[in-house]
Image: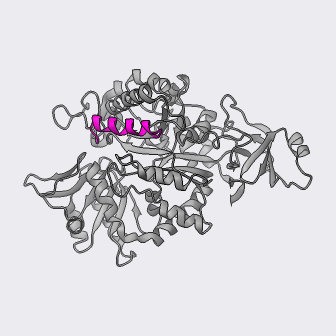
């Protein structure tokens, strides 16, 4: 036995146990071997087993970010990308110009975070301002919602995009009244271009950024992630297994990573990863990821009825993958026993995805290993909520998305539809398994913000609105913690090994200086991670 960890406040995250208790956790190797009353656990252990006593401090399973994009999270926190929303087009361009002065000579100027609907004035940008600032250097601005690129003429030229270029299916290039490119690329077009905009980084810079980000995750008490593909088409999916392998070989892999590559006709990418990581405790490839629609703020999320503020008659968004194409892909994966996680935001996309999962279950049964999962599912049809439970589909949400666009749901969807968004309390009442994450870099990887926003439904920065947005959907701290640990393990298809403090599971846990179950939720963001354990090893100590 390697060590025993004890505290008067241990939350195991097991279903049905909502309180913290005085417990001891015995660890041997990378696994928990016993959990129980401290006197009993210590008496059953070898006399030489060291005991770490955390007193009144709070212990729970390590946090698990069920949906992020680790490449962009890591690079976005490195010196090579500017993370900035900007207050206006001009302000962001100026900040990018200042940022570019310290970049390597071979670097493109890359930013992430702009949201034109939150600018003053709220106007769509064009390449003109970028061309003035960067006449000779490629510049690409990646939007805050992760679905749009804003490029200058030099970048378009380097990428070979002209006014006559045909965008890929599910994507588009904006043009002005004269048919000239404005520099804006949406959805599949943006995602096809983005990997080429970042080729200059090279593997060594990326590996360094990954290692640095893993250390920051440990400081947040995050021990596991689901690294989600960002590409709905063949090509670079931004799942950099080569970088993970390089760090593991060097003894620098500081997180448990579940990799979800893009679902394509050729399923060999996933199956090769599954073979390679069959006996790897830290790396796995549980299933596939695909995109079915876009985002409401850009009117690319697919709705059953038009937007309340349509930009043209019949404006109800669009599917990024035709429904029959998605059906073919998901059924083929189900036939081979693979789970799928689908990006769906609008009620039309959610409904169509559930139809496909239902057909897959009728043909092949529910997955024997893992769980199909819907990602984001922001705006649901009321009747589809119970279908999630019926089909054993995990609802994977990102609480900090709730307040990204104050007033946006009411503006785009109207009052009636906006009342059925991110219904965390309803999910709990209906017995639907939930998983929590950040969708980083769309929102920051800050564990206390995830919990705070889920519990209060208030913005983690402005604390808007008072009482919370749709306060009837607030959840208690125990539910939020369980969603962020055990629920995320379900989304990763690894609840047998992760997500709760039980014998036989991996010894991944976090120690906090306050008990989230008993403090005022408004004090939650002040809670500090005191220690983080991954596979029984102390990887962070405050």
Rendered image quadrant of residue 503: top right
Rendered image quadrant of residue 477: top right
Residue 281 vs 289, above or below: the answer is below
Task: Confirm whether the magenta stretch covers residue 239.
Answer: no
Residue drawn at (65%, 52%) of the image:
528
For the C terminus, the quadrant is bottom right
Pick whichever, 34 or 451, lies toward us: 34
Task: Confirm whether the magenta stretch covers residue 328.
Answer: yes
Residue 244 vs 450, above or below: the answer is below
Residue 41 vs 412, above or below: the answer is below
Residue, far left: 178
Helix, strand or loop for the magenta stretch, by majority: helix
How many marks overall? 0
Look at the image and give the residue range highlighted in magenta: 320-339
Asked if residue 344 shows in the view, the reply is no
Q: Position of residue 372 (x, y in %)?
A: 47, 36
Residue drawn at (47%, 54%) of the image:
272
Q: Position of residue 334 (x, y in %)?
A: 43, 36
Pick whichever, 497 or 526, lies toward us: 497
Q: Position of residue 454 (x, y in %)?
A: 53, 37
Rendered image quadrant of residue 219: bottom right
Pick whichever, 249 or 295, lies toward us: 249
Pick whichever, 220 or 2, lies toward us: 2
Q: Position of residue 279 (x, y in %)?
A: 61, 53
| Color scheme of the displayed model | one colour
Asked if residue 330 shows in the view, the reply is yes
């Amino acid at each position: 036995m390697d060590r025993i960890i004890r505290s008067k406040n241990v939350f195991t995250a097991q279903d049905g146990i909502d309180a913290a208790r005085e417990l001891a956790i015995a660890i041997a190797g990378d696994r928990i071997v016993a959990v129980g009353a401290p006197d009993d656990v210590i008496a059953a252990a070898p006399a030489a087993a060291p005991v770490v006593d955390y007193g009144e401090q709070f212990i729970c399973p390590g946090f698990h970010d069920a949906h992020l994009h680790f490449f962009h999270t890591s690079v976005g926190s490195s010196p090579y990308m500017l993370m900035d929303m900007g207050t206006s087009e001009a302000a962001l361009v100026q900040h990018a110009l200042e940022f570019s002065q310290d970049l390597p000579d071979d670097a493109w100027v890359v930013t992430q975070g702009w949201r034109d609907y939150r600018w003053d004035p709220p106007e769509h940008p064009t390449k003109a301002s970028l061309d003035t600032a960067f006449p000779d250097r490629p510049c690409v601005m990646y939007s805050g919602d992760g679905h749009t690129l804003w490029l200058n003429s030099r970048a378009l030229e380097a990428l070979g995009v002209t006014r006559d270029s045909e965008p890929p299916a599910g994507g588009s290039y904006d043009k002005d009244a004269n048919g000239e490119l404005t520099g804006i690329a949406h959805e599949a077009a943006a995602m096809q271009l983005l990997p080429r905009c970042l080729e200059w980084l090279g593997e060594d810079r990326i590996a360094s950024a990954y290692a640095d980000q893993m250390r920051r995750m440990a400081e947040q008490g995050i021990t596991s992630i689901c690294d989600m593909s960002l590409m709905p088409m063949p090509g670079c999916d931004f799942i950099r297994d080569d970088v993970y392998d390089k760090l593991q070989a060097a003894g620098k892999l500081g997180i448990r990573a579940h990799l979800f590559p893009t679902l394509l006709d050729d399923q060999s990418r996933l199956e090769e990863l599954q073979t390679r990581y069959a006996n790897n405790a830290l790396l796995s490839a549980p299933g596939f990821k695909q995109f079915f629609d876009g985002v409401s703020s850009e009117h690319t999320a697919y709705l059953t009825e038009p937007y309340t503020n349509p930009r043209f008659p019949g404006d109800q968004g669009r599917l990024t993958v035709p429904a029959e194409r998605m059906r073919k892909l998901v059924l083929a994966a189900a036939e081979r026993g693979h789970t799928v996680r689908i990006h769906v935001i609008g009620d039309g996309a959610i409904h169509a995805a559930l139809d496909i999962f239902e057909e897959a279950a009728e043909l092949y049964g529910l997955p024997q290993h893992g769980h199909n999962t819907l990602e984001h599912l922001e705006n649901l049809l009321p009747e589809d909520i119970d279908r999630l439970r019926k089909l054993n589909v995990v609802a994977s949400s990102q609480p900090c998305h709730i307040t990204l666009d104050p007033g946006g749901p009411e503006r785009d969807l109207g009052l009636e539809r906006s009342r059925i968004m991110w219904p965390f309390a309803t999910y709990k009442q209906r017995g639907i398994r939930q998983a929590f994450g950040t969708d980083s870099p769309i929102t920051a990887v800050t564990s206390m913000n995830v919990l705070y926003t889920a519990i209060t439904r208030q913005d983690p920065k402005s604390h808007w609105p008072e009482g919370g947005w749709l306060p009837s959907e607030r959840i208690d701290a125990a539910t939020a913690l369980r969603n962020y640990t055990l629920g995320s393990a379900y989304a990763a298809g690894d609840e047998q090994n992760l997500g709760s403090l039980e014998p036989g599971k991996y010894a991944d846990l976090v120690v906090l200086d306050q008990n989230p179950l008993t403090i005022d939720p408004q004090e939650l963001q002040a809670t500090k991670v005191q220690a983080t354990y991954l596979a029984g090893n102390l990887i962070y100590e405050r």
